[in-house]
Image: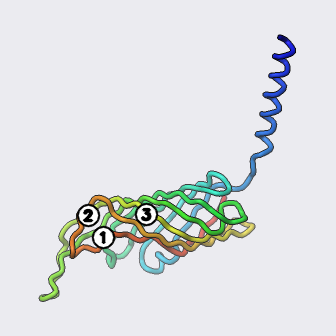
Amino acid sequence: MKKLFLLLLCLLSLNLFAQEEGKSSFKRNEIKGNALFLVLGTFEATYERLINEESGFGISLHVPFTNDSDINFSVTPYYRFYFGKKPAAGFFVEGFGMLNQVDDYIYDYNSNFEDKNETITDFAFGLGLGGKWITNRGVIFEINAGVGRNLFSEYNENRDYEFIGRGGITVGYRF
């Protein structure tokens, strides 16, 4: 009985050592800003946490700082799966959800009249594609695009908000 207990204890300790060696070390946090949206008059910042070398999850906040846009804000959590050789880099696919709020307007094309009808808050699910490149010093360059569908607002022939888009040219840093 003592020999069996000793053998079992040795096997468990070997298994624990094997788990320690398999861990890979790379930086797992990223902060990014969407340069394309900045040029267009809106602000989008993103934080991403890498789960392992092939996947990560993150959240983006999009807020316009001009009155030219119907969009009030959007918050977008996402999950990405990477196919590149470097950890969490290269081609990726993503699934996302987006809480978005837009101002809906009524247009009268005969008199060129425009009036704010209501503010619509909705949630969308969508899919996206993109590519991420990272330097040895941790600087990130990323291009992505995706489309989703709003779930809760009724479709109206005067409304353009049944489908939403997501995309950008992003620059950031991995730490």
Quadrant for residue 85, please give it.
Answer: bottom right
Q: Are marks 1 and 2 in contact (CB under 8 Å)?
A: yes
Mark 1 and mark 3: Cα distance apart in space: 14 Å
Please state the horizontal and vertical placement of residue 148, each as a whole percent of the image: 40, 66
Q: Which residue is mark 2?
A: 120
Question: Which amino acid, mark 3?
Answer: Gly
Please state the horizontal and vertical placement of residue 111, each as a whole percent of the image: 12, 88
Q: Which residue is mark 3?
A: 126
**In the foreground, 143 or 46:** 143
Please state the horizontal and vertical placement of residue 150, each as a whole percent of the image: 33, 63
Q: Earlier in the sequence, mark 1 or mark 3?
A: 3
Indicate which label's residue lies in the foreground, 1 or 3: 3
Please state the horizontal and vertical placement of residue 55, each as a whole percent of the image: 61, 56
Indicate which label's residue lies in the foreground, 1 or 2: 1
Q: Residue at x 65, y 61 (%)?
A: 88
- SS type, badge 2: strand
Q: How is the image coloured?
A: rainbow
Quadrant location, the C terminus: bottom right
Q: Residues within 10 Å of mark 1 (few under 14, many from 20)?
A: many
